[in-house]
Image (cartoon, coloured by chain):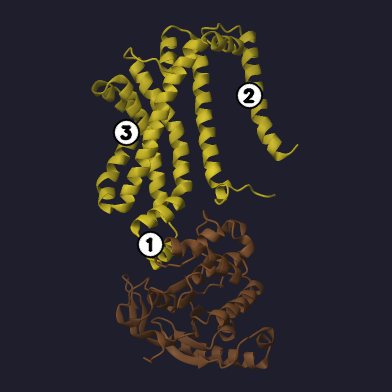
Amino acid sequence: MSASAVVSLRGVGKTFENGTVALAGLSLDIAEGEFVSLLGPSGCGKSTALRIIAGLSEASTGAVTAPHDDVGFVFQDPTLMPWATVADNVMLPFKLGAAHSADASAAVTQALARVGLSEFAGAFPRELSGGMRMRASIARALVTEPRLLLMDEPFAALDEITRFKLNNDLLAVWQEMRRTVIFVTHSVFESVFLSQRILVMTARPGRVFTEIDIPVAYPRDESFRTSAEYAGYCRQVSEALAQAMGVVA
Amino acid sequence: MSDRALRTALPFVMLGLTVFVWDLAVLWFAIPPYVLPAPGVVAATLVNDAPLLLQSLLVTLTITFQGFLLAAVGGIALAIVFNQWRVADYALYPYAVILQVTPVVAIAPLLLIYLPQPLAVLACAWIVAFFPVLANTTLGLNSVDRNLLALFQLYKASRWQILLRLKLPAALPEILAGLRIAGGLSLIGAVVAEIAAGSAGAGSGLAYRIAESGYRLNISRMFAALLLLSLAGVAIFFVLSALSHALLHRWHESAVRQER
């Protein structure tokens, strides 16, 4: 484990009660401030790995090092409390007492501003579009300024236009805050656009097949998304993914 | 005519039509008032017997309200206990079901032997109204979004916080649905017990008036009392629906008006 690693998994395995082996021999290191994607087919155990890193699930075997107490988590669904306003939803981490802030409402205001939802603080989730709900969910994960931000296919259910916009905005926030992000996705294009490093996973049982660096400077914008360089990385990652899936298929 | 206006107007048109046909039939077939009184006669009875009937209505409504309140508090409290302690759930739930599926008409005479009459009537109202609150609240508390629960655990929420800030608000629509059912049922329970008690010669609620008027062949008073009971039931339904709407309309899909 390198000195600056925030998250470190060593030979982590996870077997569910029904006998399904979700992970076997998963090892990875994530450095402080890094943006890493876990890329793999559905059912490869990416989400399970993320839940283990968050401390929501126990590894059956192996060693896990992660800052369980200083984590923000964004689920695939916005997972907002429908009975509470956007501001109250974002305030939740402070209300539950795990996180403390000298001025919680200032933190909420700032988190909402970061995701562009300042004007919707008083709105209820059902009054928002899918993209805006996800923004609120991200604001809630950011409000405690966690050391580690875990994102479980957060944009998978959104349309492409909204998804691109949220990808851009997420990168802007990340550059501003420079927290460690682990981003789970099954989209090659999304992982290449966002990350510094992509861990390609195999399915059943899940483990890291290979890793690919994307040494492209930030800020990355629309010109990167349409560049030949981007297309090249996408092809490279797609081939790796195909091989990863071929390993078991 | 807008859909909304139609929905408001049509039931009243139906009512008017029914009363008209009823009146016409009584006139046409010369039905004597001790078999079927004309609507006008029922209305006159309602006015003439108003002091007696309203006093009885008050008795029945008081029992209904008390039974409902006990059912609401008891049902929600027991559902919380079941949700928090699985052992209590396993031990007691079958008996809650048995209490519910045993017809209250059959329980009422027994209760009237063991309990003073007003208490027996109250117990009947409670037994009937209690289960829907318990069942619906249990369902609501158990169907919390798994991810929200995980989120609460991530932020180290206490059991108490999970109950107050997550499970109870999430269960609110189901709790209110249970209360809406319980409101109508507690009236039914009170009436059933009053009838059972009434035949034993005691009581002064509306249902007792109906039984009593039956023995005296005072059919128009039976109709008048019945009308008051239905109105009471409708009023209970509307009050509870309004409460539900007030609590849910900002956030819950069931209470959001659909744009067309």
Q: In the rendering, at what x and y percent does residue A161 appear?
A: 67, 73
Circle 2 Cα neighbour tier, 10 Å, few/some/many (<14 / 14–19 / ≥20): few
Sequence-first tag of 1 and 2:
2
Residue A187 visible, this angle:
no
Residue where numbered disc 1 is placed: B157
Chain that the image shows in yellow: B
Q: In the rendering, at what x and y percent does residue A148 appear?
A: 45, 78
Local secondary structure at mark 3 = loop
- The label on residue B102 is 3
Chain that the image shows in brown: A
Q: What amino acid type should be assigned to the residue bearing mark 1?
A: Ala
- Work out how far the residue at label 1 is from the one at label 2, CA to CA, in angstroms: 55 Å
Q: Do circles 1 and 3 both sit on a common chain?
A: yes
Sequence-first tag of 3 and 2:
2
Q: Are marks 3 and 2 in contact (CB under 8 Å)?
A: no
Q: Quadrant of residue B142?
A: bottom left
Q: In the rendering, at what x and y percent does residue A149 appear?
A: 48, 76
Q: Are marks 1 and 3 in contact (CB under 8 Å)?
A: no
- The label on residue B15 is 2
Local secondary structure at mark 2 = helix
